[in-house]
Image: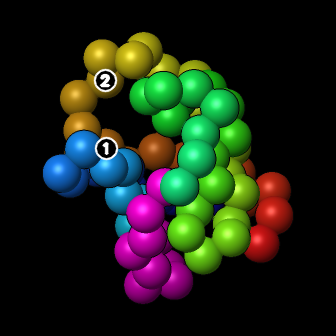
Amino acid sequence: MKVMLRKTDGKYMIYVAKKDLETTVVSSEKPACWGGKITLENGWVLEMPDLPEDTRLPLTVEARKLEG
């Protein structure tokens, strides 16, 4: 699914247009959210693509929903 990742006030936020959902990232395997699993405030777990830590945000990427 396509998601937009942005950073606001030091927190990562995810927006999913098809679900009209905007929520906060509550945990991630890696500090910059790239190349691992992230858990969203609503309970979803997404697998994010592997990108460099210094990738500029906001950015729309293809993520895979694992749980939730």
Q: Which residue corresponds to mark 2?
A: 55
Left or right position of 49 against 59: right
Compared with 44, 31 (above or below) is above
Q: In this view, does 13 lie above or below 60?
A: below
What residue do we see at 39% from left, 17% from top? 53
Which amino acid does the dot numbered 2 rest on?
Answer: Thr
> Residue at horizontal 42%, vertical 84%?
20
Residue 63 in view: no
Quadrant containing the C terminus is bottom right
Q: Give the range drawn in magenta.
A: 16-25
Contact (Cβ within 8 Å) of mark 1 with mark 2: yes
Please name the residue that numbered disc 1 is placed on: 59
Q: Which amino acid does label 1 sit on?
A: Leu
Which element type, helix, strand or loop, lies under badge 2? loop
Chief secondary structure of the magenta span? strand
Left or right of residue 57: residue 1? right
Give x and y (percent) for residue 7. Answer: 26, 47
Q: Residues within 10 Å of mark 2 (few under 14, many from 20)?
A: few
Q: Quadrant of the N terminus?
A: bottom right
